[in-house]
Amino acid sequence: MTQKIIIFAPDRLHDTLEKTAAKVSLVGSIEQLTASIKNRVADMVLLLNLPPELRRRAMSEVQKVGGISVVCLGEGQATPRSLGSGPPEFDPLETARRYMDDNFRKPLSLDEIAAHAGISAGYFCRRFKQRYQITPIMYLRNLRIARATHLLLHTDLALPEITDQSGFFSVSYFCREFHKAKGMAPIAFRRKHSAAKIF
């Protein structure tokens, strides 16, 4: 079954695939849905059961138009699938979070993380903070601090190696961020916890 992707935005309708006769029969439903979308959160994005190729294409179109909502319609369907029928298959924020979890040891930019999830950097930052109550930058910093803490406590690695393996890329920056998070320098932290193990 062929699927159509229709992007709804206030007073704009963009069809990413060729026009078909089925689209004409959907105009009434589309107008009703567009009216209700105007009353909802401005940046809502729903991707329902799209194959990866169509998902990427839809996300690209949403970014171009500053879209409000993406809804997947099956060929010949008279009305859109229910918007309350469960979580979408693709969650861009969770995709971005997993990408940070897997790649925090590398230099990451907000643009790179957002692009990996198929969303704009501004949307990513706003929604990430709303969902997780932490900014993406602080989330990355916490991942790196947790890794550095583990290495300080469980290895004899020197600070440059710990810095590199935890994703900081500068010993001075690592020491500054570690002190902010733990209230002491990395070496003092290691000494304090090594002494505690002896007693």
Image (cartoon, rainbow, N blue to C red):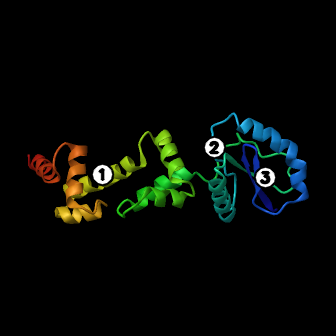
Callout 3 secondary element: strand
Residue holding disc 3: 73
Q: Nearer the viewer, residue 74 or 173?
A: 173
Q: CA distance from mark 1 to mark 3?
A: 44 Å
The answer, for residue 125, to whether it is visible in the render is yes
Can you give x and y, in whole percent of width and height, for residue 130 in the image? 49, 39
Residue holding disc 2: 44
Q: Are marks 1 and 3 in contact (CB under 8 Å)?
A: no
Instruction: Count neighbours of disc 1 (C-alpha within 10 A) and say few if under 14, some if 14 to 19, many if 20 or more.
Output: some
Identity of the amino acid at label 1?
Ala
Q: Nearer the viewer, residue 64 or 41?
A: 64
Q: CA distance from mark 1 to mark 2?
A: 33 Å
Can you give x and y, in whole percent of width and height, for residue 181 in the image? 25, 44
In this rendering, is residue 108 above or below 127? below
Q: Tell me if 138 is positioned left or right of 3 in this view.
A: left
Callout 2 secondary element: loop
User: Which of the two discs, 1 and 2, sits closer to the camera?
Assistant: 2
Q: CA distance from mark 3 to mark 2?
A: 17 Å
The answer, for residue 78, to whether it is visible in the render is no
Can you give x and y, in whole percent of width and height, for residue 15 in the image? 77, 57
Q: Are marks 1 and 2 in contact (CB under 8 Å)?
A: no
In this rendering, is residue 34 above or below 159? above
Q: Tell me if 170 is positioned left or right of 108 in this view.
A: left
Can you give x and y, in whole percent of width and height, for residue 14 in the image? 75, 54
User: Which of the two discs, 3 and 2, sits closer to the camera?
Assistant: 2
Q: Are marks 3 and 2 in contact (CB under 8 Å)?
A: no
Identity of the amino acid at label 2?
Met
